[in-house]
Amino acid sequence: MAEIKNLLVVGLGLIGGSVALAARKAGFAERYLGVDLAQDERQGALTLGVVDEVSEHLEDLAPQADLIVLAVPVLAMEPVLQALKPHLKTDAILTDVGSCKAVIAEAAERVFGRQPANFILGHPIAGAERSGVAAAQVDLFRNRKVILTPTATNSPQALDQVRRLWKLAGAEVLEMDIRQHDEVLARTSHLPHLLAFSLVDTLARRDERLDIFRYAAGGFRDFTRVAASDPVMWRDIFLANREATLGALDEFLEGVQRLRDAVEHRDAEELVSTFTHAKSARDYFTALLNETGYQTMQNQKINFVTQPGGGPVQGRIRVPGDKSISHRSIMLGALAEGITQVKGFLEGEDALATLQTFRDLGVLIEGPHNGEVTIHGVGINGLKAPQDPLYLGNSGTSMRLLSGLLAAQSFDCELTGDASLSKRPMGRVADPLRLMGAEIETAEGGRPPLKIKGGQPLKGIHYDLPMASAQVKSCLLLAGLWAEGETSVTEPAPTRDHTERMLQGFGYPVKKDGATASLVGGGQLTACDIDIPADISSATFFMVAAAITPGSDLTLEHVGINPTRDGVINILRLMGADLELSNQREVGGEPVADIRVRYQPLKGIDIPEDQVPLAIDEFPALFIAAACAEGITRLRGAEELRVKESDRIQVMADGLQALGVDCTVLDDGIDIQGKGEAEAVFTTARLQCHHDHRIAMSFAVAGLRASGSITIEDCATVNTSFPGFAELASSVGMKLESERPAGRA
């Protein structure tokens, strides 16, 4: 990368001065130059050591500059570029700090006849109430975001230098399309400033304005703080980003009018609906941005670290609610007539993604509060068009089931997810939905995002599933609610039937004939109460923990034992586990029981293929049990494991081998050579879970039989299905800690 000798800042205000200070501290250039029309700003920059040399005229310093930062008002950009043009070095790099990008790109094209290859448009999301070089701060950009909007014609070398400048200043550098940047900033920055200016101006015109400001609480001061910003700068921003700002303002005015109407007509439900949606959206997305959600796996890191000497595993616990049933309770409750009360809702990120999505579709949902959710159903035809793409995080269940439910709506919508979900196959739902008449676009390879065109009449079909998949079956049955005639699905092996059971609980007839489930479109759903059992997939980690650790005696309460999900119980029993069911009963159409597991030596088995679809999510934990069994455990017919959040066969095999366990990988399964009653089955290792929550928790269980510590990296994704896993594991005897590695962010 070419060396930057001279950095020139044009506009020595707060932002320009802070750029120079941060660059100087990081040693980005040899000399720092500044141009500003104001004598006091030039003198201040020299006095404060912001720059080494200043001038009022661009032609004095521009010929020396290797990189030029344009920190002038956006509407002043064109004349500045015009003045710079004859004095630029051939290879000089330009960048800017303006909060509107399209107007600057257009100005550059007018001045240069094209978008210059070395002009990298940028925008630091940072500022302060004070302005001028005296307010410049060396750490203004530390831990703040800087958005670059490079074009296809930009020089990669120039882009790298600008990116390096901002990273050395301590910023997180992101990239965006120019148009997207302007639309996003119009809503997140420009509109709030406009509202703050307007509110303060309105109140300042009233006779009682002194009392208004004297008794204003903290919320008023926080909201109106930005009204102290530079008026001239913001005038230019609003005019430069006029169209996007008007669009944002129109959307806001529509929302304000709805609230005004609600207050005028005493519409309590509309008020609480709006307020609940606003609060939940802020909480939900704040969690993501604060690195407590899906984004954590790419930003802040959380590792699990096990220590030897854990166990025995003892006590009585209840694991979180069943994720599959939690998803479906929100979906069907939203489509029902009346109010649905849900208990035991899983407050993990996958289920919360579904909940937030239905709020975005116009459904009033209260909670969750300690697992309790109240859903005000809108009826089978009551969903509203979302304003933006529906973001589903890491939840494949949400995306696949929603694609069926949304394929029949009157509006267009787009389903997106995080990096992991964006790699998962969605053609398996898109293809049969197209046979029903849906119009769905996918990315290359049938992967997300899914773009669904509304207003397409659906017709019932019969579909033979090419592989056992409860998600595909449920997707088609949900689409069938709106389809003309009968929709039926035949599966090659039994899969979980939560959708069929819950539809019947909501009063919608579903016929079951052997391996075929069917329903007729055009009916209605009636609200009901739902008590969600504890998730057997989450319980599995503790069942295996007790089954492999001498002296263990653990009871798991209120676990769902749906016969389409009980493969893990059957397989552990075949391996010799001492596993007892008690207090068996049915709750809301779902069978539940308390499960007691006591340690007993396990033996390797050939896992019956008819049990594979009944335990498909539980195999990572079962692989740990197999490693602790006497003899070989063989799994076949499990190719579905290859396309989960990770390739669970290969990832588990890699981890087991790193832990000293012999195994052989096949296309559809694995052979695991167990070590029996050896005191230490596993060695010390550092493992990758590949952002797969079940992999992370399974290797955490392995720590109970390890000779040393096991570190499992990047485990934040455990929150998608089992928030509080590490704490609960520690409470029953596992030695498991969560850590944030130093220097990782």
Image (cartoon, grey):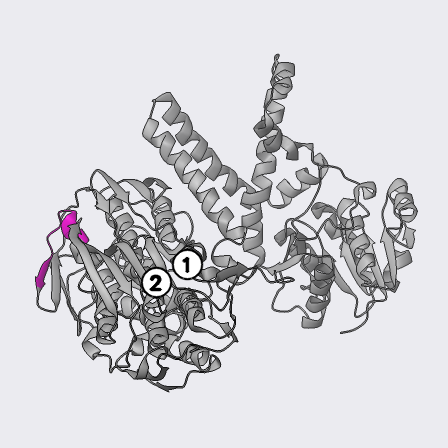
Q: Secondary structure at mark 1?
A: helix
Where residue 550 appears, x then y in whole percent?
A: 36, 69
Q: Which mark is residue 542?
A: 2
Q: Which quadrant holds the C terminus?
A: bottom right
The disc labelled 2 sits on which kind of residue?
Phe
In the picture provided, is 413 more to the left or to the right than 49?
left
In the picture provided, is 722 more to the left or to the right than 640?
right
Where residue 634 appears, x then y in whole percent?
A: 29, 83
Q: Is residue 510 magenta?
A: yes
Task: Assess whether mark 2 and mark 1 are in contact (beta carbons under 8 angstroms).
Answer: yes
Q: Is residue 13 magenta?
A: no
| Residue at x-position 45% and y-position 69% | 703
Q: Is residue 649 visible?
A: yes
Q: Which residues are magenta?
A: 502-512
Where residue 61 appears, x then y in whole percent?
A: 89, 58
| Residue at x-position 34% and y-position 64% | 552
Q: CA distance from mark 1 to mark 2?
A: 8 Å
Disc 2 crowd rating (10 Å Cα; few below 14, some 14-19, many 20+) is many
Where residue 670 appears, x then y in whole percent?
A: 33, 83
Question: Residue placed farthest to the top in the image?
Answer: 207
Q: Secondary structure at mark 2?
A: helix
The disc labelled 1 sits on which kind of residue?
Ala
In the picture provided, is 14 more to the left or to the right than 697?
right
Q: Is residue 589 visible?
A: no
Quarter of the image holding residue 444? bottom left
Question: In terms of sequence position, does the residue under pointer 1 or pointer 2 come before the other?
Answer: 2
Q: Which quadrant holds the N terminus?
A: bottom right
Quarter of the image holding residue 606? bottom left
User: Mark 1 = which residue?
Assistant: 729
Above or below, 636 relative to 261: below
